[in-house]
Image (cartoon, grey):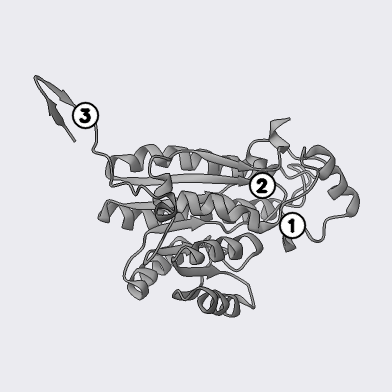
Amino acid sequence: MSVSNGDRISIRAPNPPVEDSVFKQLRLDGRTVIITGGAGGIGYEIARGLAEAGANLSIWYHSSQVADKLAAKIAADFGVKTKTYKVDVTDYSAVEAAVSQTVQDFGRLDVMIANAGVPSKAGGLDDKVEDWDRVRAVDFDGAYYSVRAAGLVFRQQKSGVAIITASMSGHAANVPQEQSCYNAAKAGCIHLAKSLSVEWAKWGGRINSVSPGYIDTAISGDCPFEMKEEWYSLTPLKRDADPRELKGVYLYLASDASSYTTGADFVVDGGYTAR
């Protein structure tokens, strides 16, 4: 957009309306948010945080047996609309259909949180190729499919926000576990968000990523005691995180409080990658 300034023409875009109250900036009343992997440990707490701020939720799951129960609890606790969708994020046609159905069911789409992910259990030489393909398909392809399908809606309406759940593993090679596929996929997620942020800025869209560290969820529940002790020894805060400690960063990025934030990656890892 060009703005006349005397004899000179500026390319400066206009500022959006900004609430003076930061608490109002953080509100999501009436907005619709999709959360993939929304019935998992991190996804569920993200969902609760955004619902507390007033968001209506399209909660996607793949294999959870309790997704409907969790969605009903969120609706009851916060008085928002929730609906669950069984979606395989590795299937683009299924992702696109679920986005379309969400828009139909809720009447709008404002935020996509591409959060679904699975870990890898072996290093680059010991991992089975089919396991590599599965982790890449869920963690990287699934993130791209999700933000692509939502982004097509956002571009048409010239507004929308996406958040990709990456990982501190996209910044560092974790020890003692070997997980080259997971690390590479999450590094790809970080750069995917950065790259798309430049493309989306032309029409008013924003996209960022979050890189959590070790989080106390069911995914890490079967890890040996000795492995966890090494994690803690390498983390300056000497612990893993409660998934509720991630709610604030996702709320910030989903809301108008972050209206000038795009292409950024937010590391929430207890200092692991700061060493």
x, y (%) of residue 104? 33, 73
- The label nearer to you, 2 versus 1, is 1
Residue at the image position 77 percent from the left and 48 percent from the top: 122
x, y (%) of residue 253? 47, 49
- Residue type at numbered disc 1: Asp
Tag 2 residue: 182
- Near mark 1 (Cα within 10 A), the count class, few <14, some 14-19 or many ≥20, is some
First in sequence: mark 2 or mark 1? Answer: 2
Left or right, 62 with respect to 27, comes to: right
Q: Give me the disc on residue 11.
A: 3
In this rendering, is residue 99 above or below 74?
A: above
Whether tag 1 and tag 3 are in contact, CB under 8 A, the answer is no
Left or right, 32 with respect to 219, comes to: left
Tag 1 residue: 216
* Element type at mark 3: loop
- Residue type at numbered disc 3: Ile
63 or 235, nearer to the observer: 235
Alpha carbons under labels 2 and 3: distance apart:
41 Å
- Residue type at numbered disc 2: Tyr
| Residue that sits furthest to the front in the current view | 21
First in sequence: mark 2 or mark 3? Answer: 3
